[in-house]
Amino acid sequence: MPEGDAVRRTGDRLDRALAGQVLTASDLRVPALATTDLTGALVERTHTHGKHLLTRVVPTSGPPLTLHTHLKMEGSWRVAAAGERRPGPAADARVILTTARVVAVGLRLGLVELLPTAEEHTVIGHLGPDLLGPWTDQDRSEAVARLVADPDRVLGEALLDQRVVAGIGTIWLAESCFVAGVCPIGPVAQVADPARFLHRARTMLQSAMLTGRPVTTGDRRDPVWVYRRHRQPCKRCGTTLVSGQVGVAPRERTTYWCPRCQPAPPDRT
């Protein structure tokens, strides 16, 4: 599943392509919206919160609407100039938004819904602060409070819970825990300075958002410390890296760590 930085890049790409444009055609290929026509609507902008995409439009009549999409595991948005071949397989298209300049196609989207913009809180209000959002003092305080609310909770499970903080997926779970020297299968309580931990995770996402790929080691040819490096040597100490599961079935995810640099509590090994 794309992580917060990849979703933000997708949102920014949609925003550059569609913001300020009037839809000359729309095709929403999900049952609940099959008869909905947004032709004539003005696209205001595309906003993201964590892994959620919110494309706000002003129709020719009625209140402003938000097209809420989520990529889930396999979804993507692609954009092509008007007159070019429509991107992606036609059978995978779930949303097609056309303007005089571009066509934007949502492929294999995991979620597509349309709601009044005034009701966006009903679909994202439960989420924690967005690591790639404004990150005000209030955001920081709320994120820390949500993270430490259950000190005994498995750290990796808490970080993947978008209700705690929005935007972290399996890459940033593994890499942020390594950099902080904490074990992802250990408890939240092992994080001595939660505010610093979240700040460093945010910095990683910001860097990846700008560069277009995760590079936590500073070396594009060898970009990550532990993610997907099971049974390979730790770049810091040479110890063989291990992997394990975090989260609750059926949403368990694989994570990676160094047993020497990130020792797990005895009852968590």
Image: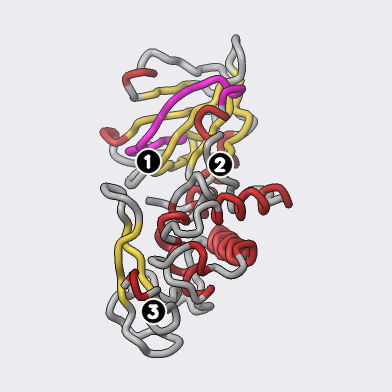
The disc, 2 or 3, on the residue closer to the chain's N-terminal end is 2
Give the number of callouts: 3
Visible in this render: residue 34?
yes
Q: Nearer the viewer, residue 103 or 91?
A: 91
Q: CA distance from mark 2 to mark 3?
A: 33 Å
Residue underneath mark 3: 258
Asked if residue 103 is positioned above or below residue 146 in the image, the reply reads above
Q: Amino acid at mark 1?
A: Pro
Measuring from the top left, give residue 226's x and y in whole percent. 40, 74
Q: CA distance from mark 3 to mark 1?
A: 41 Å
Tell me, for residue 87, which label it has, or none. 1
Tell me, for residue 195, which label it has, or none. none
Residue drawn at x 67%, y 48% as measured from the top left: 139
Measuring from the top left, give residue 141's x and y in whole percent. 67, 52
Q: Which residues are magenta?
A: 104-119
The disc, 2 or 1, on the residue closer to the chain's N-terminal end is 2
Q: Is residue 162 magenta?
A: no
Measuring from the top left, give residue 144's x and y in whole percent. 61, 55
Residue underneath mark 2: 48
Residue drawn at x 40%, y 36% as measured from the top left: 106
Measuring from the top left, give residue 191's x and y in whole percent. 54, 68
Asked if residue 92 is positioned above or below residue 116 in the image, the reply reads below
Q: Amino acid at mark 3?
A: Cys
Marks 1 and 2: in contact by CB < 8 Å? no
Residue drawn at x 55%, y 42% as measured from the top left: 49
